[in-house]
Amino acid sequence: MKCILLLILVCSAANAQNRARVLAEFNEFLKLPNVAADPEGLKENAAWIRAAFERRGVQTQLLEVPGAPAAVYGQLGVQNATGTVLFYAHYDGQPVNPAQWKGSGPFEPSYRGGNPADPETRIYARSASDDKGVIIAMLAALDALRAGRGAPTVNIKFLFEGEEEAGSASLSRILQKYTPLVMADFWIICDGPVHQTRQQQVYFGARGVTGFQLKVYGPRRELHSGHYGNWAPNPAMMLARLLASMKDDEGRVTIPGFYADIDPLTETELAAMKAEPPIDETLMRELWIARTENAPRRLMEVLNQPSFNIRGIDSGAVGEASRNVVPSEAAASVDVRLVKGNEPKAMLEKVKAHIRDQGYFLVEGREPTEIERLQWPKVAAFYSTEGGYRAVRTSMDLPQSRAVIAALEGMGKPLVKMPSLGGSVPLAIIEDVLHVPLIGVPIANHDNNQHSHNENLRLQNLWDGIETMRALFQLPPY
Amino acid sequence: MKCILLLILVCSAANAQNRARVLAEFNEFLKLPNVAADPEGLKENAAWIRAAFERRGVQTQLLEVPGAPAAVYGQLGVQNATGTVLFYAHYDGQPVNPAQWKGSGPFEPSYRGGNPADPETRIYARSASDDKGVIIAMLAALDALRAGRGAPTVNIKFLFEGEEEAGSASLSRILQKYTPLVMADFWIICDGPVHQTRQQQVYFGARGVTGFQLKVYGPRRELHSGHYGNWAPNPAMMLARLLASMKDDEGRVTIPGFYADIDPLTETELAAMKAEPPIDETLMRELWIARTENAPRRLMEVLNQPSFNIRGIDSGAVGEASRNVVPSEAAASVDVRLVKGNEPKAMLEKVKAHIRDQGYFLVEGREPTEIERLQWPKVAAFYSTEGGYRAVRTSMDLPQSRAVIAALEGMGKPLVKMPSLGGSVPLAIIEDVLHVPLIGVPIANHDNNQHSHNENLRLQNLWDGIETMRALFQLPPY
């Protein structure tokens, strides 16, 4: 009895020491700015990742194509491997507005009053959850194996992309150039959050995405609203009317053909969806909302439809900065999520056709000219800022899919199986080049403020994530 | 012949010297920041005005009430005066965003490549036209009289307000406290622009104004648009739909009762409107617009209706700063212009009733609580940021009105007579306390970017304005 207690205490002390080491390394990684606007920062992140994996015996190299941040590649061969699996994550983060971050900046990782010994504490920083956390989990899982928890059962490859948040514009070129390196029996995509119930989740697809910027035009220059208001066209009102024409009060998109071209879900996928633990009401309370769009459809159902989301609108000024003017122009930014069957370009064509149907003369990728503005009553400019990519769904009945499910269920906790994630991962880009199955295993908490300010990772998700990565490195035969 | 030429040359040299002196003084005045957020700056402006008028023999004093910038008062008595006239202008300016000013900042007056000897050159600075320009014109007109152009025919009073751009919230208290000083046979309001044809203009009223800030709410925090988009309500779309419900595609306000309570124009006023030189088509070309709101009504007709103008909208981010999120809230800023018959409060009540009719639970002057957001499907907050004031119209047939028209027509140029200015001047506040006729004589060019960045005054307007002020100081008997 005494011996066992002593063993537990010793293990616990060793464990605390391990965790402190993991957090120290995480902290160092999070301090490196990783936004697209800072190419030098991205280079430092890539160099940091290479060094960290090399220290664990992983051979690394940069995968480079002109005009893009390099991807970091790594490989770890094992004896008697039953196959080869590639683990994907990205090391770049969404743009940041430091003014919106409370207490500590986006690249000043902090616990914000929490105690790192408490697993409910979170670490705050850009990319804490999306995706630096899982990269740290992989490193710690490699350490655990090297410290005596057994050997990997498969050859492990790693690929860390540096351009995911900018739409993975160069990933295809990278995969084409380095196909032999990145080829594997299948890929495990370690991006996205776990289920909102905090249960481990595996997903077999992800929505695609595209997006655009839209501008409408009023008078050439701002005008005094008293001398010209309600005579000179107000672009903020024009934009409001145009956007309002795109969705009804229930949240249903009213752009003609928006819900066409959708591949139906299979019986297996519908069954998996049905087995998902209920979360809508809990989420609504947590988010202070008393209704949802597209009700009575549940969140999971809505995520299996294409979506039309206004990311931002801007015209003139509000609050203290308000001035009594008719603004000169108004802008909106929109992202469109795609499900299997939707093509990014075709979806944007539907949006453009709808804008023209509202009486707009539409120019693309440029400002309208004086002549155009004088000729057409309503003028809009459409900027396809992101190429975007299709949705992908992998069959849940493949041997690789079953092996991943077995490894995760082998950890002894409930597992949520999602036919598709609501968020987008550039799976189509990978599928188009490599034609390998793609399966998603995320580790981040759902309430991580991903893509926004105050992004964070719950520490228990990191500790669980290390175990998850270890289980996947020791995948059963498939 | 030679003698006349010499005389012209001498006069012209003297004139150039005079103008250089006027511009030097103007330059000094424009350098003083005069925004509401900078009370010390406003004090410096007031002190500058006092000193400038005292140098011309005008007795001045500050009119002070607690919690407001002081107004500057001045008086100049004359022998055998036929009456007493007060000249009103304001010395405060609209808020500034220096980043939007091209070439030189809002308080760095510049000609931007123009030549001050060319009357088409403009001087750029906050308040160049609104209203520091006319204050300089008054000073130069006093100099002209003192230099031998004759004596004033009326006792002259001056009142320069320091809070007009903030809604003249304290003007009423100032007038009540100092009634004997500010009482006159009538007031001449030297605010606003001349006619778009560049012809001198006299106006006999001005619209009133009120305004509000509106916020609508989505999820408590920004959410990843892939994982929650089109399920969590998007506040930018909610705001777009709400604003779109307030105006139709022709620019007609659709808020119930918005066009009720309008006092009709008299025959004289309708005749003056009809005599206005046509300007709509020229303006449309200048402003690059191919249609107007409320067509086929002309600008002058539209300005004699109440207006509903979106000053700004804001939610999430657009352009480079776009992030794939469902924003948490969306805001709009609106100004409402009032015509004779409209009451500010009653107009806002109509707006609020309309918002409620769209299914919103509306809180006023505060953020909604968690409980309210959980209870009501659609929640909005309404902030009445400005009290506002009524419109005023003075009869064009009063002896004072006729005297002003005679003085201006005596200058030998065409005169445009407007029943009401589209812009707002706090005439109701003055009328309520003093019950004196109010007549507007502006000097600024219409295309002055008033209330916006790159505000400017065309120099010829300044030179004409000096003559206009001189003519009014020498008003015929009434």
Image (tube, coloured by chain):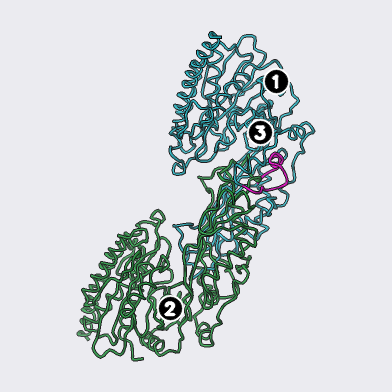
Chain colours: A green, B cyan
Q: Residues within 10 Å of mark 3 (few under 14, many from 20)?
A: many
Q: Which residues are magenta?
A: B289-307
The amino acid marked with disc number 3 is Ala
* Labels 3 and 1 positioned on one and the same chain: yes
| Chain ID of residue with mark 1 | B
**Near-viewer residue (B4 or B23):** B4
For the residues marked 2 and 1, what is the alpha-carbon distance in whole angstroms? 82 Å
Of all residues shown, which one is farthest toward the front? B1
Reading the chain from its start, which is encountered first: label 3 or label 1? 1
Rendered location of residue A122, percent (x, y): 36, 67
Mark 2 secondary-structure assignment: helix
Q: Which residue is mark 2?
A: A432
Q: Is residue B78 above or below residue A50?
A: above
| Chain ID of residue with mark 2 | A
Rendered location of residue B113, percent (x, y): 45, 34
Of all residues shown, which one is farthest toward the right? B267
- Residue B406 has which mark? 1
Q: Is residue B101 above or below residue A18?
A: above
Q: In the figure, residue B339 lies in which quadrant?
A: top right
Confirm whether residue B221 shows in the render.
Answer: no
Residue appearing at x 48%, y 40% in the figure: B96
| Chain ID of residue with mark 3 | B
Q: How many marks?
A: 3
Quarter of the image with the N terminus of chain B in it = top right
